[in-house]
Image (spheres, rainbow, N blue to C red):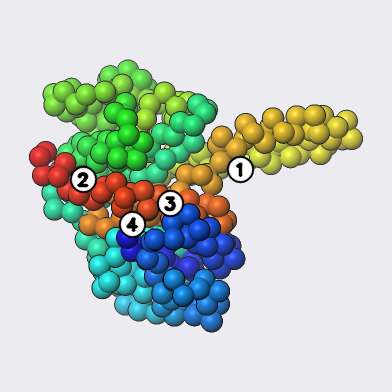
């Protein structure tokens, strides 16, 4: 197995990616790694890692032409290396837009895939249960057929990674069959017409984190807003708890009493164990680590890539879409 790793681009810099990669290699010493980043700082990774020198990062606000002509950034070099070396997977914590643009142009989508989608596990209130959510923003608009394709690809992903037959739902503004945008309503009827198994129906935004379903499907515009809303709510809740527990000496004492239980409960909603998102439907495994990934989160993004390659996800999706 060969994985290309963009060592730059994340908010926490090389400290996070080097530690994360080192931890991953300790668990998987048989994996061949090509690390793209500053050669003089990556020599500490040892002789088992091939380093390709890069000192520049892709600009977060880079427009399409800049992305296309960029040959110096670690992200551009990493994506080109993935194709040139015929590696199995790539992991980057760089900007999502540029990353998806480069992957779309250089890696290409699988034959039979209408459009790739950005898919990620999200935490839920059910312990040890993750729900897959897609599309998280790879597309601004989608058709009914594309949402059906997302359902099929995400079911293959879930079966390959979690080894279970998943229950899925559509994200809507009401649980009733007649609720939702025209796209969601038409997709609902198409699912019934095709008799796709394990369809729970519609699920509302307030129920996303409950863990009642294994996959939630929507268009990229809606999915991205839902994801950002959840992330923002989590950040606000954290600030409110901090303010409450530091308000007075009495509250600080109360925090000491509940500190352990509170951290355990909040850890259930942490993004660190999730391993980032995957650009599903491509000819290679393309994993997007969270931009603010620390060493643990980055290691888990590498683990996601590893598990997808190990379980032959590309071949399974290719075979699945060829039978649609």
User: Where in the figure is residue 208, as x and y percent of width and height?
Assistant: 44, 30
> Mark 1 = which residue?
235
User: Where in the figure is residue 160, as x and y percent of width and height?
Assistant: 30, 40
Q: Earlier in the sequence, mark 3 or mark 1?
A: 1
> Mark 4 = which residue?
286
Q: Is residue 44 above or below residue 108?
A: below
Alpha-carbon neighbours of circle 4 within 10 Å: few (<14), some, or many (≥20)? Answer: many
Relative to 103, is 52 on the left or the right?
Answer: right
CB under 8 Å between callouts 4 and 2?
Answer: no
Q: Nearer the viewer, mark 1 or mark 2?
A: 2
Quadrant in which the N terminus is drawn:
bottom left
Q: Earlier in the sequence, mark 4 or mark 3?
A: 4
Relative to 70, is 156 on the left or the right?
Answer: left
The foreground one among 315 and 212 is 315
> Mark 3 = which residue?
303
Q: Secondary structure at mark 4?
A: strand
User: Where in the figure is residue 40, as x and y percent of width and height?
Assistant: 53, 81
Q: CA distance from mark 1 to mark 2?
A: 35 Å
Q: CA distance from mark 3 to mark 1?
A: 26 Å
Farthest top residue in view: 176
Q: Nearer the viewer, mark 4 or mark 1?
A: 4
CB under 8 Å between callouts 2 and 3?
Answer: no
> Mark 2 = which residue?
317
Q: Secondary structure at mark 1?
A: helix
- Residue placed at 11% from the left, 38% from the top? 324
CB under 8 Å between callouts 3 and 1?
Answer: no
Q: Earlier in the sequence, mark 4 or mark 2?
A: 4
């Amino acid at each position: 197995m060969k994985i290309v790793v963009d060592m730059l681009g994340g908010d926490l810099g090389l400290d996070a990616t080097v530690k994360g990669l080192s931890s991953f290699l300790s668990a998987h010493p048989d994996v061949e790694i090509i690390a793209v980043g500053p050669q003089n700082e990556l020599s500490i990774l040892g002789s088992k890692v091939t380093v390709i020198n890069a000192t520049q990062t892709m600009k977060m606000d880079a427009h399409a032409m800049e992305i296309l002509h960029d040959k110096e950034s670690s992200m551009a070099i990493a994506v080109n290396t993935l194709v040139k070396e015929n590696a199995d997977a790539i992991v980057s914590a760089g900007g999502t837009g540029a990353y998806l643009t480069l992957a779309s142009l250089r890696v290409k989508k699988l034959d039979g895939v209408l459009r790739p989608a950005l898919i990620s596990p999200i935490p839920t209130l059910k312990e040890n249960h993750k729900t897959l959510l897609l599309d998280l923003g790879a597309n601004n608009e989608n058709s009914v057929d594309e949402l059906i394709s997302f359902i099929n690809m995400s079911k293959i992903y879930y079966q390959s990674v979690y080894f279970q037959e998943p229950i899925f739902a559509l994200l809507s503004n009401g649980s009733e069959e007649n609720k939702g945008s025209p796209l969601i309503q038409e997709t609902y009827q198409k699912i019934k017409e095709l008799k796709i198994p394990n369809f729970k129906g519609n699920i509302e935004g307030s129920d996303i984190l409950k863990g009642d379903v294994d996959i939630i499907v929507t268009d990229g515009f809606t999915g991205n807003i839902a994801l950002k809303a959840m992330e923002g709510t989590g950040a606000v809740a954290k600030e409110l708890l901090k303010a409450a527990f530091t308000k007075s000496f009495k509250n600080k004492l109360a925090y000491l009493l509940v500190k352990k239980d509170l951290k355990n409960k909040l850890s259930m909603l942490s993004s660190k164990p999730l391993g980032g998102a995957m650009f599903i439907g491509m000819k290679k495994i393309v994993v997007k680590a969270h931009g603010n990934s620390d060493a643990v989160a980055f290691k888990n993004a590498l683990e996601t890539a590893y598990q997808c390659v190990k379980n032959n996800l590309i071949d399974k999706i290719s075979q699945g879409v060829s039978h649609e």
